[in-house]
Amino acid sequence: MAMTIHVDIVSAEQSIYSGTAEVVIASAEQGEIGVYPRHAPLLTRLKAGEVRLLKGGQEEQFYVSGGMLEIQPDVVTVLADTALRAADVDEAAAIQAKEAAEQALKDQTSKMDYAEAAAQLAEAVAQLRSIQRMRKGKKG
Amino acid sequence: MASGKEIRTQISSIKSTQKITSAMEMVAASKMRKAQDRMAATRPYSEKIYGVIQHLAHARPEYKHPYLQDRIEATRVGYIVISSDRGLCGGLNNNLFKALLSDIKDKRNKGIEIDVCTIGQKASNFMSRLPVNLVAQKAQLGDAPRLQDLIGTVKVMLDAYTEGRIDSLYLVYNEFVNTMTQEQKLLRLIPVKPETPDELLKYPWDYIYEPDAKDVLDDLLVRYIESLVYQAVVENFACEQASRMIAMKNASDNAGNIIDDLQLVYNKARQAAITQEISEIVAGAAAV
């Protein structure tokens, strides 16, 4: 039987594949890389593309939009990205989060006032109800 | 004693409240189960990436990443606080905020300034009332939060660390122990301090880095921290549902008890009215 290597493909949100393969082919940042068992430890980034697993003449394919590839002599781990990553996209998301915070600080008076008013209203209604009950009780 | 009709309306209003609380309990139970599955699904990634980080911290590459280095004196600290978006989930958020406040107080006494970034509506409402610096916020992630939605919020804090505006970063969230127990957690994200297992110390080795250690490490550490935050968000959601389920179960049980009590009062009042009527009739008949 041919030598096999253990392969894990995981993303932050789920585990995609876990099993063995004879060869793992992935598109690393500096070109395609083919990994056979007993490969030297290696760490690299992946480009968007396919990860192909060869096993017993059959091929399985997984698409990843990027990520990291870790190679140990008997284990290959693909840490796949779930999101499309780019510096400017990340930056935009960061700005959005900051703006949301500023908005929250600006809005806090109106929102807090509403919540407090609602709480006070509920309290007043409860008081009224108990007063009415007491009055009725006295009459009866 | 209150009249029969009044008690009847009270009973029926409590019954409708009970219907709502028991419906919420069932919804929370089913959401909790899904959240637990999601929690299990995120675990492999963070375990794998933690393993790589452990190797890295031990391998001592020529490049030391700032996230892995302790800063000697902390003057400003960042917190990422994770809460639920909605209330009616028992003391979950309040207990978390209490734990956070006591930590903030400790830091303040040492003259350390606080930066806060919130994930979840409740945290942002709470934090905006406090005299802390709220730098970023994110809310309404929904039932199935995506990592994509968190990248921006995490980046704000990571940038703050890189630029030296904060000297360490903490993550505050609820840890899901089981349905009955949720624990408040205060985890230090940066500087990263991975534990090195003994077996790694025996045979030192290092990776081949492509293109170079710096680029790879930068990406890896950012992803590691994002995955920790993501997992905390997923875990906190499971906590929210579990806590809501318990709170609603208690509410339904209490409503049941009140209904029983009121029913008893109602029956007594009805019986008293009947007895009075009969004695009046009998007295009337005797007088005739």
Image (spheres, rainbow, N blue to C red):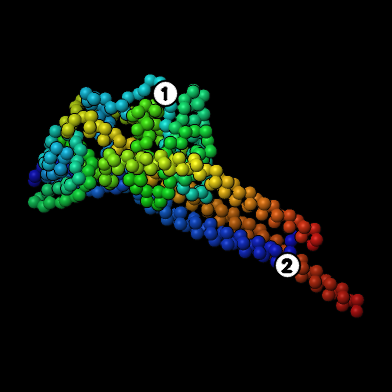
| Mark 2 crowdedness (10 Å alpha carbons): few <14, some 14-19, many ≥20 | some
Which residue is at a point 55% across and 56% down the rendered structure image?
B252
Q: Which quarter shows the C terminus of chain B?
A: bottom right
Residue at (60% x, 51% y) in the render: A118
Front tag of 1 and 2? 1
B259 relative to A106 in the view: left or right = right
At numbered mark 1, what does the secondary structure look like: helix, strand or loop?
loop
The count of marks equals: 2
- Can residue A70 be spotted in the picture? yes
Q: Is residue B13 above or below residue B160?
A: below
Do marks 1 and 2 share a chain? yes
Q: Which x, y percent locates residue B123?
A: 48, 41
Spot occupied by residue B270 in the image (x, y as percentages of width and height) = 73, 67
Q: Which quadrant holds residue B162?
A: top left
**Please, which residue is most extreme toward the top here?**
B72
Chain to which the residue tagged by mark 2 belongs: B
Q: Nearer the viewer, residue A46 or B3?
A: A46
Relative image position of residue B135 (x, y in whole percent): 43, 36
**Residue tagged by mark 2?**
B270
Q: In which quarter of the image is residue B259?
A: bottom right
Residue A77 position within the rendered picture, expressed as x and y whole percent measured from the top left:
21, 40
Circle 1: residue type: Ala
Residue linked to disc 1: B74
